[in-house]
Amino acid sequence: MHPILAADLSNVDVLLEKTRHHAVQALGTLQDRPAALAPRPFQLKRLPDEARGLQAALDEFTERWSPGFSGSAGPRYLGFVTGGATPASVAGDWLTSVYDQNPTAGIDSSAPDLERETVRQLADLFGIGADHNGVLVSGATMSNFVGLAIGREWLGELRGIRVSDVGVSELGKAHVISGTPHSSIYKALSMLGIGRKAVHKIPTLQSREAVDIAALENALEGLVGESVIVVASAGTVNTVDFDDLIAIAKLKERYTFWLHVDAAFGAFAALSPADAHLTKGLDQADSICIDLHKWLNVPYDSAVQFSKRRDLQTRIFMNASAYLGMPGDNPDFVHLTPENSRRLRAMATWFSLNAYGRAGHAEIVERNIRLARDLGDRIARETRLKLLAPTRLNVVCFTLADNPNEARVNAYAKEIRDLGVVFITTTVHAGTWGLRVAFCNWRTSAADVEMIAASLVTALRFDQVPVATT
Ligand SMILES: Cc1ncc(COP(=O)(O)O)c(C=O)c1O
């Protein structure tokens, strides 16, 4: 063994204690770190030739990299749809690396069963029944990809072919119909050879992002005999609108289609008794996507994918080899997703679910919803801003009252970021440039909302410097 590696091994308790100290410092000062900051110019450093040991790497990281990192795990990073990491999930994540299990195959340890237990606990959390099996993937995009892949295989089954064997060209054209699909749906369809242009956007209800069920039925009527996947949204990114999942599932009695639900973060409405009705019908979907690194507040990267057709799933993702074995009734994870070897990412979720239970996680969700509505009310009262939609759940979608063009909205967003108090991201909603404040973080409090509201007002000074208008 190289002497520096050997020294690190014999000194591992001291070195990990120093790392723990760094971590505790970072967590303890998270609320003081800028929510986000402009990336700094950096100088690429060459690979060191000589070994220096963990202490040197930790020192260099602390000096060169850590100051430029955002407070994305903190209470006021509300851009995109971003969760933090609960204490238990951080501990679970650390131990994932310590044990370094590969849950791919089930012949060498009980690690894969920890993932199976986690998936069942998640199913309970969201009211998903025993008809569905689940597996952990790296994020909602991957979960959507796997769900749509199973849908594609099912379309082949209807035509008596195995797409996984003969290829997508034998399937012919597939149609994907949806009201307000997330951009990751298009990406998944591109990867699946179905193609981005397979998406038919169906009209939504007036001033809503939820699909118009009559229009959806009309589209299904026009596609009888064709290969059809319906992608329903349970929580759109801009306004957190929900398709009527029960009505869509009911259409399956009269039309033939695969029903995939993208519930990346909307599934968590099931934890709030006042909002749980929004997720009714979720478990009637053929495949479901739910992110974990968003509203469950576990570290990246983690999502769960549920489906009712594990047999089709294993056909697609089977990695048939003498050394891995063939998939049986309880297939190893290697046969269920694009990944082969991977980390036991379920540990972070298992720790958080078993530390805080349903009640702990429900409290986060309910508090986030309450805080979002409070901020929405404050924005509605500020005459220089205007809401682009009512605050349905945990995202406030708003814009500048005066001339909200791309340049002005981007200048405002940059000013907000540079103040360092809160980070939010821009969007276009119903053709208008705006901004989204997405509440998902387990730490965010009423005091944070005070600071956020004040910062959104201060940042209106962006207007005092001339900006290009379009
Ligand atoms: C509804 C929805 N689907 C999918 C995604 C993609 O998630 P990920 O970045 O985890 O792949 C997001 C991310 O915001 C989302 O909001």
Image (cartoon, rainbow, N blue to C red):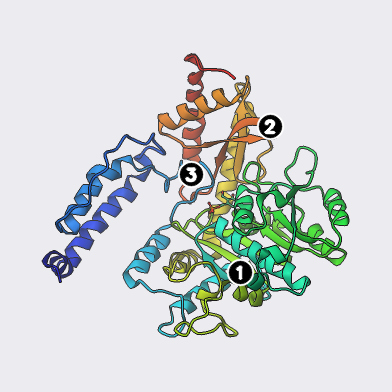
Q: Nearer the viewer, residue 399 or 106?
A: 106
Position of residue 128 in the picture relative to residue 15 (left or right)? right
Q: Amino acid at mark 3?
A: Ser
Which quarter shows the N terminus?
A: bottom left
**What's the mark number on residue 431?**
2
Q: Amino acid at mark 1?
A: Ala
Q: Does mark 2's beta carbon lie closer than 8 Å to ligand 1?
A: no
Residue 21 pos. (x, y %): 24, 55
- Do the CB atoms of the residues marked 3 and 2 lie less than 8 Å apart? no
Position of residue 174 in the picture relative to residue 46 (left or right)? right
* Residue at the spot of label 1: 123
Residue 395 pos. (x, y %): 60, 42
- Do the CB atoms of the residues marked 3 and 1 lie less than 8 Å apart? no
Residue sitting at 35 percent across and 43 percent down?
Answer: 69
Local crowd size for mark 3, using a 10 Å CA cut-off: few (<14), some (14–19), many (≥20)? some
Task: Judge whether 371 appears above or below 154 on screen.
Answer: above
Q: Does mark 3's beta carbon lie closer than 8 Å to ligand 1?
A: no
* Residue at the spot of label 3: 445
Q: Marks 3 and 1, Cα distance to the nearest angstrom?
A: 28 Å
Residue 48 pos. (x, y %): 18, 52
Q: Nearer the viewer, mark 1 or mark 2?
A: 2
Residue 168 pos. (x, y %): 67, 64
For marks 3 and 2 on the same chain, the one whose residue lies earlier in the sequence: 2
Mark 2 falls on what kind of element?
A: loop
Q: Which quarter of the picture shows residue 282?
A: bottom right
For marks 1 and 2 on the same chain, the one whose residue lies earlier in the sequence: 1
Q: Amino acid at mark 2?
A: Gly
Residue sitting at 66 percent across and 42 percent down?
Answer: 239
For marks 3 and 1 on the same chain, the one whose residue lies earlier in the sequence: 1
